[in-house]
Amino acid sequence: MNFSLTEEQEAVRKMVRKFVDREIIPYIQEWDAKSHFETGILKRLAELNLMGVCIPEKYGGMGMDYNTLAIVCDELERGDTAFRTAVSVHTALNSMTLLQWGNEYQKEKYLIPQAQGQKIGAFGLTEPNAGSDVGAIQTTARREGDVYVLNGSKTWISLCDVADHFLIFAKTDPSKKHDGISCFIVERTFSGVTTKAIKGKLGIRAGNTGEVFLEEVRVPKENLVGEEGEGFKIAMSALDNGRFTVAAGACGLIQACLEASLKYCHERKTFGKEIGKHQLVQQMIAKMSANLEISRLLVYRAGWLKNQGKRNTRETSLAKWFACDAAFEAASDAVQIHGAYGYSNEYPVERYLRNAKAPVIYEGTREIHTIMQAEYALGYRKDKPLRKMLPSWPFAE
């Protein structure tokens, strides 16, 4: 076992950290307060070739391994969850899904400009009445000659107002539940596509999240991803990638909580000594430190399996579950360490706490992952081979 990062991975980490320190942290409090999503950050990430960091070079990406994507997400969330979310959705949920399931036509037309950051991708699975219960989606797609006609709506869609391309899941055969779901590439410019941002969120206020409405949207048959009825399997494999990046981002949030808390522990004095000298404060610091190390090991293990081209649903679920819970606990403890000051936006920890709640819910709730891990342990759940696997790394030329 080799736990060291490569020189290339270390270089990427330093580059992203420098970017975050210079272009996100000085402005994020204002963006968060105004619920403003700064699209210029996506343009700068594209200039740094980070919108397709783990996409093969022949499809416009950097061609680096999947753990390098984890490093990027880790460092971005240290700045703010909103920008890690953007990369999770664009790269992990959309682009990596096209890499795994798309045909050459779709990769040439959609994946290449996304990997280059020229176009932005989003992911449309969740609906007002269908979250964890994917089989309950009500969006439909009926075949009419050379097109599919889509009707329905999606909600809690990140990048809804800025994405150029959406992966939309719809029922081509409503009688078959999970086996009747198919996946389509939908362009924003298609007639009948409209979006609306959701306001008043508890956290991730500097991100763009909202609804997508589809009214008689005519989608060319060439934009069917995979085969009819394969949408549920495509969605679940996409979530393996999305959950991986969410877990990696949670590590960055723990890191941010730890850095803020360590700084405050040395600045603040009570009873004649730094608060870091008090044992119960040390207990919270110790938990943050331990959970950060554990979370990163779980993430890198899942990434190693991805690099090997192996199924990693169980390992990714565990990483997502553990790291997101740990991040929420770290944020709560960071506020506690800061005392009354942690309850105001004079310090960043109140934003960390607000941001930390959403990842415990999205891409599989804490409860869903608890059930998954129990079913794996009990032998009730086993992963079957997929018709198409995510390419192993190094990528073939």
Image (spheres, grey):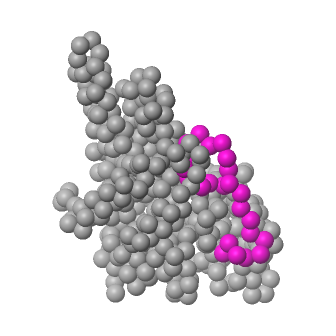
Q: Which residue does the image show at 28% across and 19% down from the upper left?
A: 269
Percent across and percent down for residue 11 are 25, 64
Residue 355 in view: yes
Task: Identify which residue, 396 or 375, lies in the foreground.
Answer: 396
Where is the C terminus found, in terms of image quarters?
bottom left
Percent across and percent down for residue 298 are 33, 51
Q: In this view, does 135 lie above or below 102?
A: above
Q: What stretch is highlighted in magenta?
A: 187-210
Q: Does the magenta stretch include residue 196?
A: yes
- Displayed quadrant of residue 186: bottom right
Q: Does the magenta stretch include residue 344?
A: no
Q: Which residue does the image show at 66% across and 67% down from the upper left?
A: 169
- Displayed quadrant of residue 64: bottom left
Most frequent secondary structure within the magenta stretch: loop
Where is the N terminus found, in terms of image quarters?
bottom left
Residue 236 in view: no
Q: Which residue does the image show at 60% across and 67% down from the upper left?
A: 163
Percent across and percent down for residue 29 are 49, 43
